[in-house]
Amino acid sequence: MSQKQYLKTIEREIQRINRIIDFKIVRGEEYSREARDHKLLLKKVRFYNRQGFFRRLFPSILSF
């Protein structure tokens, strides 16, 4: 699986979790587990985006 496909899969999972959280908020239910999963997935997306940023910023240094 390429990095692009992996990020797309994570983004789909974030959207799915967001829908679950929205339904739970409307029903007045607890959603702490989903919030934790959401936070973890966002952290993964940010990590991969930051890694790409540094590769674009310093391409000659990181190509060793």
Image (tube, rainbow, N blue to C red):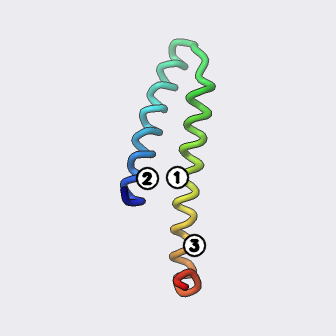
Mark 3–mark 2 CB contact (< 8 Å): no
Circle nearer the N terminus (3, 1): 1
Name the residue at 52% across, 26% down: 21
Residue 29 position (above or below residue 20): above
Dot 2 amino acid type:
Leu
Name the residue at 39% across, 50% down: 8
Q: Can you say which quadrant of the picture contains the C terminus? A: bottom right
**Distance between mark 3 and mark 2 Cα atoms:** 17 Å
Mark 2–mark 1 CB contact (< 8 Å): yes
For label 3, the residue is 54
**Distance between mark 2 and mark 1 Cα atoms:** 7 Å
Name the residue at 40% across, 41% down: 12
For label 2, the residue is 7
For label 1, the residue is 45
Where is residue 19 shown, x and y percent of the image?
44, 28
Q: Can you say which quadrant of the picture contains the N terminus? A: bottom left
Tag 2, which secondary structure?
A: helix
Residue 23 position (above or below residue 18): above
Circle nearer the N terminus (2, 1): 2
Tag 3, which secondary structure?
A: helix
Bin the neighbour count of mark 3 within 10 Å (Cα to Cα): few under 14, some 14-19, many 20 and up.
few
